[in-house]
Image (tube, rainbow, N blue to C red):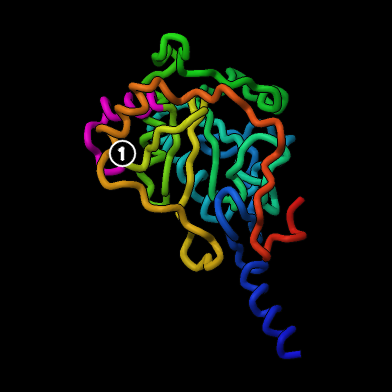
Amino acid sequence: MRRGLFIVMLWLPMAAWGQAVGEYAAGCQYNASALPDRGPGYYVIRHQQARYYGQPEMINYLQELGKKVVSAGLPPMLVADIAKRQGGPFAYGHRSHQTGLDADIWLRSPPPVPDSERLATISAVDMVDHRGYYLTAAFTDNQRQLIALAAQDERVSRVFVHPLIKQAMCRTYGNADWLGRIRPWFGHSSHFHVRLHCPEGHRDCVPQAPVPKGSGCGSELAGWLRDRAGEITVTATAPWRPRLPRACIGRVE
């Protein structure tokens, strides 16, 4: 009896208050919140995929970022994948986005009339000419400002972007202390990926190592640019099926 009560006491905090469990690429979530399909400064796209669930901290972050977008006079942002309601791996696509602490924001502007049908079938716009390895005219100051607003929040662990976009941010913002959170990575030429720190009190959330000190605009970025890296040329066909924490077994598909 005591053992059963102890297990219930351990489970209740996750069920009642929400928890990100495990690693960003091997975990699940409890008590996720749904991001409303639209709000000040944002729209949720491809709503039919039901990947708009996140931890309360992520939902609050996105809504606050939307308000900053409005204040800056920028076009509404397009929020894509966050996580499934219970978290866990997707049937296809991302390896991360499992704990409700990751979110993708597209770099294109919304269509002129962003009705539900258009938002359900909208296409991404690549900001990089991969053959010539340069940013296209689609990448403007609007995109730079949006990424900067996203990265300046102290809750942010990382913002993943294409190396050329990181270079553009370095050229515009110099050695701003938040630039180190913006990380060059593969496959982020049409969107950027925000990752939040494990929230306080989420005892089963596994944090990622801190980013290196500094702006990240020096030798590390130079290596990416020298190798012309940043494009994903091979897509895995098998779905990502990591070993999940015990608290996630039977909870996710």
* Tag 1 secondary structure: helix
Residue in the picture at 59% in, 62% down: 19
Dot 1, crowdedness within 10 Å: few (<14), some or many (≥20)? many
Query: For residue 28, which quarter of the picture?
Result: bottom right
Q: Amino acid at mark 1?
A: Leu
**127 in relation to 145, above or below:** above
Residue 125: image location, x then y, percent? 54, 18
- Residue 144 visible to an observer of this rendering: no
From the viewer's perspective, tell me whether residue 17 is left or right of residue 197.
Answer: right
Rendering coords of residue 106 (x, y %): 53, 29
**Is 100 in front, or is 47?**
100
Q: Quadrant of residue 220?
A: top left
Image location (x, y in percent) of residue 141: 36, 22
Q: Residue furthest top?
A: 132
Q: In this rendering, would 14 be left or right of 140? A: right
Identify the residue position indicated by label 1 in the image. Answer: 179
- Is residue 188 visible in the rendered image? The answer is yes
Q: Is residue 74 above or below residue 134?
A: below
Q: Which residue is at a point 42% across and 9% down the rendered structure image? A: 132
Residue closest to the eye, 63 or 139: 139
Magenta residues span 163-179
Q: Residue at x 65, y 50 (%)?
A: 242
Quadrant in the picture for the N terminus: bottom right
Return the x and y of residue 40 as percentages of the image width and height: 52, 38
